[in-house]
Image (tube, rainbow, N blue to C red):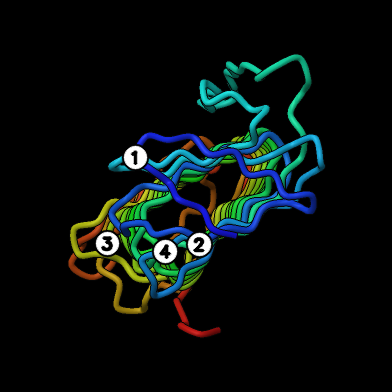
């Protein structure tokens, strides 16, 4: 299929069995994908082209708009004015349908140039982004989010679903109201929060960390930056840290109904109930703050690869 896209033009693609088209694009362009429901899968290749494949019903088709700075892709029945925001436990949704019918399910498979920044928004949508893309921003109301290999900042928010991040170099801002967050082999500043779900950071090299959960366990294994700040707060869950034997940090822990255990040579009080306990590891470079209202706290040695 040949497709010519002029700047600012809207193109409706409606082959009987779905959509499959390839067109030239600059890696500096930002890809914006909107989907009412389905799956969005994005990966990279070494071409200044974008390939869009989409499975959808005969009554649906895909609209592509390319401007001087963006490529926008959406189902024809889904309004470009679609907006929603997730903030804490609150979800605000604003939408408009094109025509009288409700949006149909669309599954996307999109290949983009290396380093292209990506935005994805959907209501009932699973999102997978794999490869050295640039900045990533994903918002879904209900669905899982997976980002592997990104080389820029990643923001991922879901109302109900899990967030999985692997092999990412860049700041992370992650949230799920009802789901787990898992991060492995990542570097940069990391902020993650859940209402009902565990947060796990494994083999990370974070310059700063802020983890918070209302009802979930927090687990961190990785190195500490010399002047980094590391905060772990959970109301109904435990906190486990695995940090190097040579760690240099000022540590503050507090729990109302839990115990503290550690591999480090620290004289732990017999009772911590309602108390804050502070101690120093090494020269006290980084700052660690831990609060677990109803859960145990463990600070153990980090063993990379285990």
Spatial CA distance of label 2 from label 3 is 19 Å
- Residue 36 against residue 95 in the figure, above or below: below
Nearer mark to the viewer, of 3 and 4: 4
Neighbours of disc 2 within 10 Å: few (<14), some (14-19), many (20+): many
Q: Position of residue 3 (x, y in %)?
A: 51, 53
Question: Callout 4: few (<14), some (14-19), or many (20+) C-alpha neighbours within 10 Å?
Answer: some
Nearer to us of marks 2 and 3 is: 2
Asked which secondary structure carries label 2, the reply is: strand
Local packing at callout 3 (Cα closer than 10 Å; few below 14, some 14-19, many 20+) is many
Residue at image location 28% in from the left, 42% down from the top: 68
Q: Which residue is mark 2?
A: 201
Could you tell whether 212 is left or right of 195 in the image? left
Q: Confirm or deny contact between disc 4 and disc 1 (CB under 8 A).
A: no
Cβ–Cβ under 8 Å for marks 1 and 3: no
Q: Residue at x 62, y 51 (%)?
A: 127
Numbered mark located on residue 249 in the image:
3
Element type at mark 3: strand
The N terminus - image quarter: bottom right
Q: To which residue does mark 1 refer?
A: 7
Q: CA distance from mark 2 to mark 4?
A: 35 Å
Nearer to us of marks 4 and 1 is 1
Q: Which disc is residue 128 wearing?
A: none
């Amino acid at each position: 299929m040949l497709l010519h896209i002029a700047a600012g033009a809207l193109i409706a693609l409606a082959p009987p069995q779905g959509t499959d088209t390839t067109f030239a694009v600059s890696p500096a362009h930002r890809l914006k994908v909107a989907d009412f429901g389905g799956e969005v899968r994005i990966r990279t290749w070494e071409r200044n082209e974008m390939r869009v494949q989409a499975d959808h019903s005969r009554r649906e088709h895909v609209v592509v708009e390319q401007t001087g700075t963006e490529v926008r892709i959406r189902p024809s029945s889904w309004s470009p004015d679609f907006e929603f925001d997730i903030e804490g436990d609150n979800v605000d949704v604003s939408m408009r349908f094109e025509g009288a019918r409700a949006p149909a399910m669309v599954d996307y498979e999109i290949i983009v140039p290396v380093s292209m920044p990506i935005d994805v928004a959907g209501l009932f949508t699973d999102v997978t982004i794999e490869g050295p893309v640039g900045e990533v921003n994903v918002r879904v109301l209900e669905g899982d989010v997976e980002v592997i290999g990104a080389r820029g900042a990643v923001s991922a928010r879901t109302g109900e679903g899990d967030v999985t991040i692997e092999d990412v170099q860049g700041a992370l801002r992650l949230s799920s109201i009802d789901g787990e967050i898992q991060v492995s082999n990542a570097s940069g500043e990391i902020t993650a929060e859940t209402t009902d779900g565990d947060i796990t950071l494994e083999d990370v090299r974070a310059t700063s960390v802020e983890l918070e959960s209302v009802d979930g366990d927090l687990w961190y294994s990785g190195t500490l930056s010399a002047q980094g700040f590391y905060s772990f707060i959970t109301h109904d869950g435990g906190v486990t840290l695995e940090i190097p034997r040579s760690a240099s940090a000022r540590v503050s822990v507090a729990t109302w109904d839990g115990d503290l255990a550690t591999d480090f040579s620290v004289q732990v009080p017999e009772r911590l109930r309602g108390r804050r306990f502070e101690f120093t590891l090494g020269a006290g470079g980084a700052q660690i703050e831990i609060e677990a209202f109803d859960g145990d706290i463990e600070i153990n040695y980090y063993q990379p690869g285990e």
